[in-house]
Image (cartoon, grey):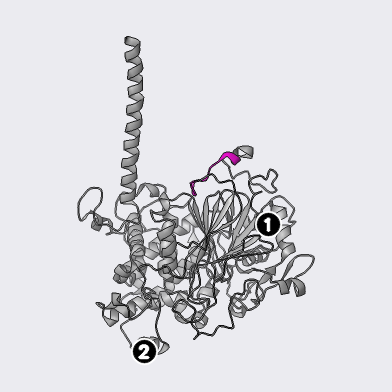
């Protein structure tokens, strides 16, 4: 009897323990969801209706992240904030913290799948919202896998500041889950080229929003953060991710580490275009190749690519290079990789393949690149042995307004409509005449220098952070007062290091002499036979017709069966190695299908 009672007691204890653990896990999940950064409710777990109002006040890291993520969740409701000095201060403080995080990262980061890979964003908040709504709708912290962005966050689009603020906030919140690589538009020579990009240039948007003085200082501070971004990433020791392409070797490519070692040796603070005085020419070339190069077109393979090296001059001009079949084969063989994933070239379908289906081009903005209103934004999910393409259908609609005569604007004043057009929240202006009328109206500029004085901007650091508790996901972030030494300006003082731009020194690539998405390039998909005034089938004008992406040549079945790798880095630990890995199930797809071929889901758009 006593034995039976003892057994029942043990069984009851185990059952009660399991139930207790389930209750605690459910409580924790409910608390996490209710307090995640992307929440927009006004009631916290304390139940006090004004508790979140207190969280939004002050200058703590938590308050800054909350304001930015709330803005991202509903930008149309935060227009006053986006045009306020508080947003400028938040960007200033956010930059300082993200800059420190990025400088601690190697120039080539290593991570494991599952991972989502995104291409160019170019200030397109709407397409970034699409990915947020359909991939990390519960928040990045609750979404399985890592997030790799391949660069080009600014220029061309009208919401550059908003995109940068959100991505920086995510990087600060999840430094080991979100990875921001550098593109060619994360250089001063490009995002400061106002003469070329006009109102769509990053420097113009900074100065238009916050005035000449403060706008320029913010532009420069953000570029100082760009200077510290990694140049490349390697997923599963098998997939090389970069913005432009593979760099030319500057040492023995067969030596330990090969080209990855060259990238790792690039200065942790690199201006590139223009370079800093301390940057060595050979490593400046490596960095330029990473952010500027393109796959060679078939015509270039025949006429201009060097047969011995596999490299040639890019159709972009300005000193940029292209890489052919031989360069790709040599690089993959020397490093033991299977694929290259890059961005840098517009594609109407969001994703393209080239070089024998070994090079993937990912483009994550569907606008501002002459691809037409039926263009799609894409990303790639790498989930162990599987790869999947996720596209935004041209028919997809969200909270953004695409017509100035929409009934959603009926209650807004003309000034409010103009502000939303200026911020990119109303994405289609019906006529050039109307836009010119708007620009010539002489409406009051919120970012006037009289409102944002240089003295006030310099005083940002003198305001201490409030002592609010950090979110659990931010435990590793130091939230001390921001009254450390001011590091704005061209010369940065961090300890004994001083970085000075050498504006007289020539870069490997001259952006002023380059052409974006040149005709007859490897992914030239501009339908030049379709004129701008022709109907594209979606109620818009112009653009090429999207086609189904052909992945028949892609075979990823051998990815996880590789046993011999070259240039493996001992500092990258893998939880499961060898044959054990084949028994793993996907943590994203929720199935154990053994078919490892590429799956294109562009015919079932989200």
Does the magenta stretch mainly form a helix, a strand or a loop? loop
Above or below, comparing residue 53 to residue 14 in the picture: below
Give me the disc on residue 353.
none
Residue with the mark numbered 1: 259
Q: Closer to the camera, 48 or 250? A: 48
* Placement of the N terminus among the 4 image quadrants: top left
Number of numbered discs overlaid on the protein picture: 2
Q: Specify the quadrant that holds the C terminus.
A: bottom left
Q: Is residue 135 above or below residue 219?
A: above
Occupied quadrant, residue 25: top left
Q: Is residue 567 above or below residue 512?
A: above
Residue 533 locus on image (x, y percent): 49, 86
Mark 1 element type:
helix
Q: Position of residue 570 (x, y in %)?
A: 63, 43
Classify mark 2: helix, strand or loop.
Answer: helix
Question: Would residue 97 be seen by someone viewing this image from the given angle?
Answer: no
Residue 129 screen position, x and y as percent: 41, 64
Q: Are marks 1 and 2 in contact (CB under 8 Å)?
A: no
Which residue corresponds to the image point at 44% horizontal and 79% vertical from the top-left?
539
Q: Nearer the viewer, residue 541 or 122?
A: 541
Decide: few, some or many residues near mark 2? Use Cα within 10 Å; few <14, some 14-19, many ≥20. Answer: few
Residue 29: quadrant of the picture: top left
Q: Separation of disc 1 and disc 2 at Cα?
A: 53 Å
Which range is magenta? Answer: 582-590
Residue placed under numbered mark 2 in the picture: 437
- Can residue 588 be found in the magenta stretch? yes
Mark 1 or mark 2: name the one nearer the start of the chain.
Answer: 1
Residue 571, position as x, y percentages in the image: 60, 44
Crowd around label 1: few <14 · some 14–19 · many ≥20 (10 Å) = many
Left/right of residue 180 with respect to residue 61 in the rendered view: right
- Residue drawn 63% across the image and 79% down it: 519
Q: Nearer the viewer, residue 150 or 276?
A: 150
């Amino acid at each position: 009897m006593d034995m039976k009672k003892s057994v029942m007691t043990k069984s009851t204890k185990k059952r009660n323990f399991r139930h207790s653990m389930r209750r605690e896990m459910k409580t924790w999940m409910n608390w996490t969801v209710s307090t995640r950064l992307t929440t927009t409710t006004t009631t916290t777990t304390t139940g006090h209706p004004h508790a979140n109002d207190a969280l939004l006040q002050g200058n703590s890291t938590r308050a800054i992240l909350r304001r930015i993520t709330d803005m991202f969740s509903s930008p149309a409701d935060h227009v006053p904030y986006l045009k306020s000095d508080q947003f400028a201060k938040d960007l200033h403080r956010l930059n300082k913290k993200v800059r420190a995080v990025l400088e601690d990262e190697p120039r080539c980061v290593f991570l494991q799948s599952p991972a989502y890979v995104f291409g160019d964003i170019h200030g397109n908040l709407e397409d970034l919202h699409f990915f947020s709504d359909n991939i990390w709708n519960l928040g990045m912290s609750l979404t399985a896998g890592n997030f790799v962005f391949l660069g080009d966050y600014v220029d061309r689009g009208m919401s550059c500041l908003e995109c940068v603020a959100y991505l920086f906030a995510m990087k600060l919140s999840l430094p080991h889950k979100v990875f921001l690589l550098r593109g060619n538009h994360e250089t001063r020579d490009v995002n400061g080229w106002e003469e070329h990009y006009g109102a769509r240039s990053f420097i113009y948007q900074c100065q238009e929003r916050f005035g000449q003085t403060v706008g320029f200082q913010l532009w420069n501070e953000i570029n100082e953060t760009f200077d510290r971004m990694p140049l490349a990433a390697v997923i599963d020791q098998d997939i090389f991710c970069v913005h432009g392409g593979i760099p030319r070797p500057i040492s023995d490519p067969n030596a330990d580490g090969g080209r990855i070692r060259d990238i790792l040796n690039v200065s942790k603070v690199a201006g590139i275009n223009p370079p800093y005085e301390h940057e060595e020419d050979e490593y400046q070339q490596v960095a330029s190749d990473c952010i500027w190069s393109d796959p060679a077109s078939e015509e270039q393979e025949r006429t201009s690519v060097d047969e011995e090296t596999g490299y040639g001059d890019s159709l972009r001009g300005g000193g940029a290079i292209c890489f052919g079949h031989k360069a790709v084969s040599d690089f993959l063989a020397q490093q033991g990789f299977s694929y290259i994933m890059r961005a840098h070239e517009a594609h109407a379908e969001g994703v393209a393949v080239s070089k024998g289906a070994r090079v993937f081009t990912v483009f994550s903005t569907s606008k501002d690149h002459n691809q037409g209103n039926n263009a799609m934004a894409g990303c790639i999910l790498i989930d162990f042995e599987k790869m999947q393409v996720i596209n935004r259908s041209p028919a997809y609609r969200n909270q953004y307004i695409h017509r100035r005569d929409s009934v959603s604007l009926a209650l807004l004043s003309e000034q409010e409509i103009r502000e939303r057009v200026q911020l990119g929240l109303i994405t289609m202006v019906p006529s050039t005449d109307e836009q010119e009328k708007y620009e010539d109206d002489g409406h009051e500029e919120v970012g006037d220098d009289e409102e944002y004085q240089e003295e006030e901007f310099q005083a940002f650091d003198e305001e201490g952070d409030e002592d609010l508790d950090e979110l659990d996901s931010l435990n590793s972030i130091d939230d001390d007062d921001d009254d450390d030494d001011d590091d704005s300006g061209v010369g940065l003082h961090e300890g004994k290091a001083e970085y000075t731009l050498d504006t007289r020194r020539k870069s490997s690539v001259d952006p002023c002499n380059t052409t974006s998405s040149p005709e007859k390039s490897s992914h030239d998909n501009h339908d030049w036979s379709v004129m701008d005034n022709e109907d594209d089938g979606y109620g818009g004008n112009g653009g090429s017709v999207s086609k189904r992406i052909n992945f028949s040549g892609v075979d990823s079945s051998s990815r996880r069966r590789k046993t011999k790798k070259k240039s493996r880095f001992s500092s990258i630990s893998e939880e499961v190695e060898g044959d054990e890995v084949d028994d793993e199930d996907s943590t994203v797809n929720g199935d154990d299908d053994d078919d490892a071929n590429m799956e294109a889901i562009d015919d079932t758009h989200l």
